[in-house]
Image (cartoon, grey):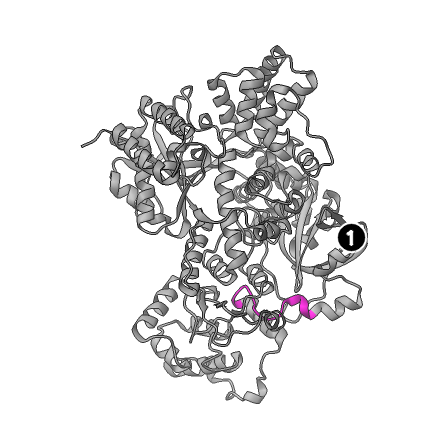
Amino acid sequence: GSTHNGLLEKLVWEGAQKRYPHLSEKHIKQINHELSMITSMGLAPYFLIMWDIVNFARFQGIAVQGRGSAANSAVCYCLMITAVDPIGMELLFERFLSEGRNEPPDIDLDIAHQEREKVIQYVYEKYGRAHAAMVCEVITYRGRSAVRDAARVLGFSQEQADALSCESHHYEARDAALNLASGGAERAGLDGRDRRVQQLIKVVAGLHQLPRHRSIHVGGFVLCGEPLGEIVPIEPAAMEARTVIQWDKDDIELVGMIKIDLLGLGMLTLLQEGLKLVKEFRDVDIDIGQLDMRDPQIYEMLARADTIGVFQVESRAQMSILPRINPQRFYDIIVSIAIVRPGPIQGNIVHPYLRRRRGLEEVTYLHPSIKPILERTLGVPLFQEQGMRLAIVAAGFTPAQADNLRRVMSHKRSAEKMAKLCHELEIGMRKNEFSEEAIATITHQLKAFANYGFPESHAASFALLVYASAHLKKYYAPEFYCAILNAQPMGFYSPATLIRDALRHGVEVRPVDLAKSEWNCTLEAVSNPISFADSALGRTTPEGKPALRIGLRYVHGLGNKAKKLLEAAYKNGGKFVSLEDVMERSGLTPSDLKQLARAGAFESLYPGRRKALWQVLSRLKKVQETPLLDLLPPYQEENNPPMSPVEQMVTDYKTLGLSIGEHPMTFYRQWAESKGIAACVNLGRHADGTQLTVAGGIICRQRPETAKGFVFITLEDETGVANIIVRPDLFEQYRHLIMRSSFMAVKGRLQAEEGVLNIIAEHFEKLPLLPGNPTLPARDFH
C-alpha cells in the first residue's frame, strides 16, 4: 500500500532513530539531501532491493556488511546496509552518488563466505531466473597460463611445460617472456638458442593481457525488470543452481543494466563463528558495533604488530608500517589500511606522512585552499575522496569531471585516461594560481592513485573488521583461532602458522582424535584450570580459557564423502569408543582409515600410530583380499618402536599440514647455536646494522609490483618470525634455493628502525635435511 519512495523514506527514518538516538539538524539535513537525490533519480527500488537482501541475511544469522562507496551514504547507514557513520566521519556523499552520474550507485555487500550461497539463491528465488543472473568477467593471460598454453601448442612435453611455468612464477606474460629469454629457459633444462624455444618466447610475449577465457564473476549479479533473455543470452554456470549472462561485468553499465555485488568475505565468517563460540563457552554477548573503540590494549597490540590472523593488517607490509604509525585511535587504523597500497606508495606519500606523524617534518600544505581537505592526513592525500575534492577545489573540476576521476582511480584504471585528466588538472590549478611545484606534486600523487588508491569509506568499513578481529584475538584467543581455522581458506597465513601463533598466545591446542574431534575444529572446556604462569611454561590452558581441538577436516585425503560418513556416524551412535567401533560404524574407505592412523587420530582409542596402523591393516585383511600383506611376517611390537619426536613431527606435516608438537626448527636449535645463528625472538636485542644469521622455515614469499624487484621472505622458527629483504640481483643469484627450499639460513645486516626489524640479506644457505625431509606450508606471491 505504499510507493517505492514512501517505503524507502519510512525505513530510512525508522533506521535513523536507531542509528542516531539524538538526531541533530546536521543529520536531518544530510538524510533529506540524500533522499531527495535518490528519489529524484528514481533509485528507490535499488535501495529497497539492497535493504531486502541485507534483511534476509541478518534474519538467517548470516554476517553481512556493505562496503566501498556505500559507506559514504547516511541512507545506507540508516538502512543497516553499512556500519560506518558517514556524517560523523565527514565522508563525501558525492563519492557514492551525484547528479553528474548517469548510472546507479555501487553497493557491494560482504557476506560470510561459507554461507554466501544461501544469499545468492535467495536472490534467484526472489526475482526469478528470468530476471536475475550472475555476470561474467574476462580472464586475461598471465605468465604461467601463457607459458603452458604456448608450450602445448608448440609441442613441448608436459614435463617441459611444467618446468617452464615454474620459471614464470607470478609474472605478467611479457615479464615471463623476458625471464625465459634471460636464462629462464636454460634453468628449465632447455636450450635458449633452440628455434622452438625462441618461438615460445615470442608467443608468450604476444599473449600479454590478451583474453584467455570467460569466467563467472565472483559475486556480480545483474537484475532486470524485463526478461534478461530478451537482451542477452543466459546459460547455466558450471556451479550447480547458478545461471550466468554472457557479458562482462564492465560492459553491462554501457546498456544501463543494474549490477549488485554479493561478495564472500572470510573475516565475516570468522567473526560470526567466533562470537557464537564466545557466547557458548564464556556466556558473553558481543556486539561488534558496540565495542569500545578506545581500548588502549587493542592499540598497543596493533602497534607491536601482533596481528597474525587480524583482518587486513597481518601482511608483512602492514606489520612493518603499524609500529611506525603507532595507532592510538580508530582513524589511525583507517590510515594504516589505506596507506599500504600501490597508489600511496608510488605517489611518494607514505614516508612524508610517517615523518610528519612522528614530528620529524613540519606539516605543510601546497596551497591554503586545500588545507581543509588534507588536514586529517597531515597534508598528503591518502584517499580517493581527497583526490576528488582536490580536483574540485584546486582545479575547479565539475562534479561530472570529479566523477570521471573517481572512475579512473577505481576499477576502470587507465594510465592514458589519468594522463588526460592530469592535463586538465594542471590547467585548472594554474588558473587558481597554484605554484608549478604544487601542480607537479599534486598531479604526480593523483597519477599514482590510478594504480590503486583506497576510498576512505572502504577503509573505514574494513577498519571496523580490523578492530573486531583484534578484539577477539586479544580477549578470546581460543575462540578466535578455532573460528579462523574453520574459516579456511582465508587470510595471509597457513593453518600451520596460525597454530604456532595460537601456542605462543597461551592457547592449549589438542590433537586430532576420532574419539573427541568433530569435522571442524572445536573448543573443549578445561576440567583442571591452572595459572597463567604455568600455562606459559607448560603450554596448557589458563583459567577460564577453553582448549582448541583440531578437527578431522585437516587430515589430508579426507573429502566431502568422508565428512558425510563421519557426521552420520556421530549422529547415529555418538563419538567412537574403540578402533573396532571406527572400523564397523564409520563406513570409511581403507585409504581413509590408514591415513587417520598415520595422523594419530586413533591415539586415545589405540595408542601409538604404528600400532594403530598395523591394527587397521590386520583388520582390513579380514574383510578384503590382501595378497601382498599376507606375505609379511606377523606384527612384532618390538620391531616397531614408537615414533621419535622428529618422526612424529614429519608425519604431522605430511598428514595434516600442521603440527601441535615441536616446531621443525627445534631439532636444529643445538646445531644453530653452535653456528652462532640467532633465534627470531632475540633479534630485538641486537643493534641496527649488526651482522647476524637467522634460520627457519619459509612461510611466505612476496614480490610486490611496487617493490622494484625486491623480494620479501618470512622465516619462522620455534620462537617467532623474521622478515628478510632480498635485493633483485641477490634473488636472481639464489633463485633456485629460495624458491625450492623450505628451510634455510640467511646471513645479513639487521635493519632496526622505529621498532621494525628486518634482515637485509647477503647470503643464503640450505639447512641440512632432517630425517623425513619435512616441508612447511608457504603462502607465496599473493
- 776 and 593: which is toward the camera: 776
Q: Position of residue 314 (x, y in %)?
A: 58, 50
Whether 151 is drawn above or below 392: the answer is below
Question: Label 1 belongs to which residue?
Answer: 748
Is residue 659 found inside the magenta-colored segment of the image? yes
Q: Position of residue 330 (x, y in %)?
A: 55, 42
Residue type marked 1: Gly
Whether 690 is drawn above or below 430: the answer is below
Q: Position of residue 336 (x, y in %)?
A: 59, 41
Residue 628, visible in the rendered structure: yes
Residue at 41% over, 53% down = 272
Whether 333 is drawn above or below 588: the answer is above
Relative placement, left or right, of 732 versus 241 is right
Which secondary structure, mark 1?
A: strand
Could you tell me what secondary structure mostly forms the magenta stretch? loop
Whether 203 is drawn above or below 664: the answer is above
- 447 and 704: which is toward the camera: 447
| Residues rendered magenta in the picture | 655-667
Q: Tell me if mark 1 has few (under 14), some (14-19) or many (20+) residues whose alpha carbon lies within 10 angstroms of its own.
A: many
- Quarter in which the N terminus is drawn: top left
Residue 248, visible in the rendered structure: no
Instruction: Tell how many labels.
Output: 1
Residue at 42% over, 19% down = 100
- 555 and 323: which is toward the camera: 323
Is residue 447 found inside the magenta-colored segment of the image? no
Name, please, the residue furthest toward the left. Answer: 1
Residue at 41% over, 57% down = 285
- 610 and 69: which is toward the camera: 69
Q: Quadrant of residue 129?
A: top left
